[in-house]
Amino acid sequence: MTTREHVWDSLPKVEQKAIWDKTERNFWVNLRSKKDAKNKKIKKDFQLLINEVQLKLSNLTGQQSQLKELQSQLVRELTKVKAELARTTNKYKEKANQLKHIKPIPRIEPINGTATGADRPDEVDDKDRMEGIEHHNNEAAETLVDVIDANGNVIGSVE
């Protein structure tokens, strides 16, 4: 027998029961306090997780509302752009139709050995082009403009 067992056996039964009850009570109290501490820690960690998730949810809700507002702004801008595009397209079509109905001016082709002269019924003959223009002399040009100050005095002339 070991010393512990010998001491235990030497105690009276009533005292053994009292010691046993106290030890058992202490065991359960200790076990409950450890369980309670563990449960408190679990509850605290769980509450922290809940708070983090609620914070993330709040942030996401804020982002969602910002994105919805941005989406509605973009929809309004897109509507404006589509309307402007439609107006521009209509103006383009109108101008294109106007250009179709304008009578083209006949082009004068340069005359070379193989090309034929263009028909120009609205124009006068080339021989008469310089008619009415007189060349008297080749002197220096006369004064065209006088430069005058604010009081009306002639400062000089511009040729």
Image (cartoon, rainbow, N blue to C red):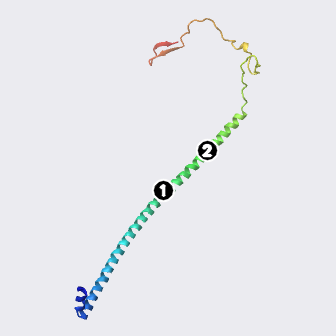
The answer to which of 63 and 25 lies nearer the viewer is 25
Between discs 1 and 2, the one toward the N terminus: 1
Q: Nearer the viewer, residue 155 or 134?
A: 134
Residue lying farthest to the front in this orientation = 1
Where is residue 117? Give x, y as percent.
76, 19
- Mark 1–mark 2 CB contact (< 8 Å): no
Looking at the image, residue 37 sits to the left or right of residue 99; the answer is: left
Q: Which residue is mark 1?
A: 66
Callout 2 secondary element:
helix
Q: Which residue is mark 2?
A: 85
Residue placed at 46% from the left, 60% from the top? 60
Near mark 1 (Cα within 10 A), the count class, few <14, some 14-19 or many ≥20, is few
* For residue 101, side relative to residue 68 (left or right): right
Q: Position of residue 95 (x, y in %)?
A: 67, 37
How packed mark 2 is, by other alpha carbons closer than 10 Å (few <14, some 14-19, many 20 or more), is: few
Q: Which mark is residue 105?
A: none
Q: Nearer the viewer, residue 112 or 119?
A: 112
Labels 1, 2: front one? 1
Q: Is residue 133 above or below residue 72?
A: above
- Mark 1: amino acid: Gln
Residue 33 on image: x %, y %: 31, 78
Going by the image, does 82 lie left or right of 113?
A: left
Tell me the residue at 30%/82% (across/down).
29
